[in-house]
Amino acid sequence: MHPRAGASLSRRRFLALSAAGGATGAAALSGCAMRVSSGVSGVGETVTVMAKADDFSPELIRQARKDLGVKIVTVRYDITKLIGMMTNGAPPDLVRGVGATDAPYFAARDVMEDLDPYFARSDVLRAGDLDPVNDLWRYDGRTQGKGPRYGMAKDFSQDSMFWYNTALFDEAGVGHPPETEPVTYEEWLEDARRLTRRRNGQTTVFGGSYQGVLTPNLLASLTASAGGNLFTDDFSRIDFTTPEARKALAWYVEYGRSRVGPSIVQPDPNAWDGPTYQAGRMAMSNSGYWLGGLINTDKKLAPLSRLAPAPLFAGGRRVSPCQAGTGFWMPKKAKNKDAAWRVFEWFFGEGPARARASGGWGIPTLKSLRPLMPAREDYQKRVLKVQNAELRHFSVIAFTPYASADSLYALFNQEAPAAMNGHMSVDTLAGRLNSVMNEQLKRGKEQVG
Amino acid sequence: MTVDQISVTGRTGAPDSIARRAPAGRPRISMTGRRHRAFYLFTAPWIIGFLLLTVVPMAYALWLSFTTYDGISPHWRYVGLGNYTELFSDPQTWNSLGRTGLFAITSVPLSIVAGLGLAVLVNRPIRARGLFRTLLYLPAVVPPVGAGLTFKALFDQNSGAANGVLTLFGFDALGWLADPYARYVLLMSVLWAAGNVMIISLAGLQDVPRELHEAARIDGAGAWRTFRSITVPLLSPVLLFQTVTGVIASVQTIMPLLLTPDGTTAGVTALPQSNYLYMMHVFSQYFALGRYGYASALLWVLFVLILIATGLIFRFTSGVVFYNVDPEAKK
């Protein structure tokens, strides 16, 4: 599971410390040869950034002042606050967002600044150096992945991959998954069942967690892996009754029913996999490369951990998308666009980007930063080998612009528990999801115009 | 100065002399006028706050309830009563309203009985009474977010203390934070804050004249009879107050949101169905689904329902609430 706002305080603190370490690295690296932005400076200006605490640590803000002469004021990321600020005509200059879902949603509502002219002028963020994952931030008015760029990812992972703890596999007598060949989802679930340990109604070891970043993205990815599409070609409707989508939905419902890992019907109090996996109480965690940032800091856990390719459905196709691509975008009504762009360039292409790349908290979004990915230890080299092989299967799975991922997630949360608790069939659930989600998409289409 | 002086002259001597020194042509302000001015000056901060922070937002929400506004999209439109008609045909509205009603009629009496019971206990002349009062009231001052975190830790299926106790005695662990047990955790979170009720009931108990209890004892009444026939009637205004505020608080509770592990906007909608109360539906419509218009309609309906519920409570309790004052005395 990917980091979320509601994660535990200890995790926040952990990430904040990581960010502080990153900032220190950035400071050290700032002395290295650096390409200099050709277009804008923004010196002396103030840039308001809506972000999470671990995006812009106090150290990083001080570093920005030193490197750029720009004062950064952060506002805690909150979608309701963002809407309030935009309604009042005073949006932040940069806003955190999830490229996979926010880009088409906000771009379709014409509130994002087209950044193509800025990219064209930049010597730091050159088109040829941008990783394809940044295409998640493109939208041509109809399809995600094409057209102008509205933002950029700060790092990324292929979020259908999973990590596993070899010691727990060995204890349960379950064979390790192949290194570069995917297992099927059916095999993954069977392994998870065999790895799960229970005592007195309590789960002492979760066989595996498979929840994606947000459930709608996960279901879209699962459907793609089964060989289909969750949305219709014009993204105005969703269909869970196609054979591929139904297969994906049935698998996810079965995952919930089997109680092999956290789900809506068996919530994890930590709200993410990190602490449970680190405690040796989770054999497989559906997290991409980014979880290595946590694993690498644990010298006992790191040698036991392996990264595995994204599974696929029997008879399906091999896809390994990024379900997030979290980064920043600039509102159309931002007040200090030039200064914001300078911060944008610095954050995505200079010291902070290098620090993130070497920290292992995700794959860098500039190809030129790839050599900085951690590969000193044997286990890091092994992980990197799997990750590099997986990149060949990367693809952008376009999301609908007519509904936010949050809204579809909320509707799923309202309908799915009955099926996961065995009170509703998958076919009934598919029909109900079609009904409520298509109603939401219809409303969104009307409002986008 | 006496009341008579004021009533005869209409003002005191001092203001009179000031009035004499006032420049010619400046209108003289009567005592009534000054009183009115003072009244409005002193109440102005509240009135301004009430207008700006209550009336204006409510009017704005009322206007929103007639639109499809989602906070961001450019093409919202006016739908008249459309949101209200949809609301009455939305099964989630009815289901959540039913659960909320059930929650109110369960949690309010429970918390009143628990709070009153505690108040009676700590009103007795026991050793370290002050300490017990403080300890029992402490949970009520813990912020709800802290209480939510504590409850999540206590009732976690795999590592919580509640299941630790159950397994210690050979029982299987329960999924407290999921259906069907989540509703009991919610009720326990209400009882956790019973200190609020206790402190108000305690104040009421201390206001009950001791001589009435003594007279009852002389007449041969036992403790229960004295409590039922003297204490409860004299506490009835306090109990009415707690019923009304308790009902309002229970229908507005956000505690279920605080008991969800995923605190994101959409994540908090991953609630067990038994805890999907009316305000959860409102929250989900506002912030997860972005339906500002529809959610505003839901809130307005809730406002009307609260008014009706409060009116009904007053109506049905008018015969049993005993006010220890003469209602005619102020006339």
Image: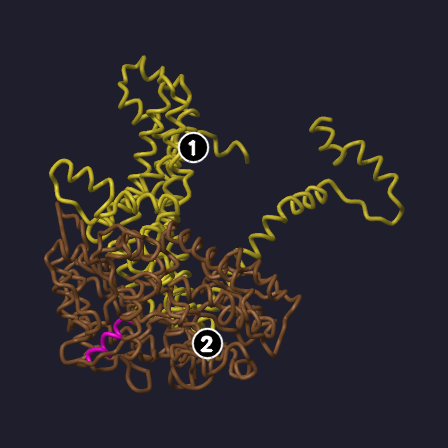
Chain colours: A brown, B yellow
Residue depicted at 61% across the width and 61% down the height: A66
The answer to whether residue B90 is left or right of residue A175 is right
Disc 1 secondary structure class: loop
Q: What kind of secondary structure does the magenta stretch mostly adopt?
A: helix
The answer to whether residue B184 is left or right of residue A147 is left
Mark found first going from the N terminus, 2 or 1: 2
| Mark 2 to mark 1 CA distance (whole Å) | 55 Å
Magenta residue span: A218-226
Q: Position of residue A356 (x, y in %)?
A: 44, 64
The residue under label 2 is B73
Q: Chain of mark 1?
A: B
Q: Position of residue B113 (x, y in %)?
A: 30, 35
Which one is in front, B2 or A395? A395
**Nearer the viewer's eye, disc 2 or disc 1?**
2
* Residue B321 is one of the magenta-drawn residues: no
Q: Residue furthest top?
A: B218
Question: For residue B221, which quarter of the picture?
Answer: top left
Which one is in front, A82 or B91? A82
Viewport quadrant of the N terminus of chain A: bottom left
Binning the other alpha carbons within 10 Å of mark 2 as few (below 14), some (14 to 19) or many (20 upward) gives many
Disc 2 secondary structure class: loop
* Residue A219 is one of the magenta-drawn residues: yes
Which one is in front, B191 or A3? A3
The answer to whether residue B13 is left or right of residue A269 is right
* Residue A329 position (above or below residue B215): below
Q: Is residue B67 visible?
A: no
Q: Chain of mark 2?
A: B
Q: Position of residue B168 (x, y in %)?
A: 15, 36
The residue under label 1 is B323
Identity, as a three-letter code, of the amino acid under mark 1:
Tyr
* Residue B69 position (above or below residue A78): below
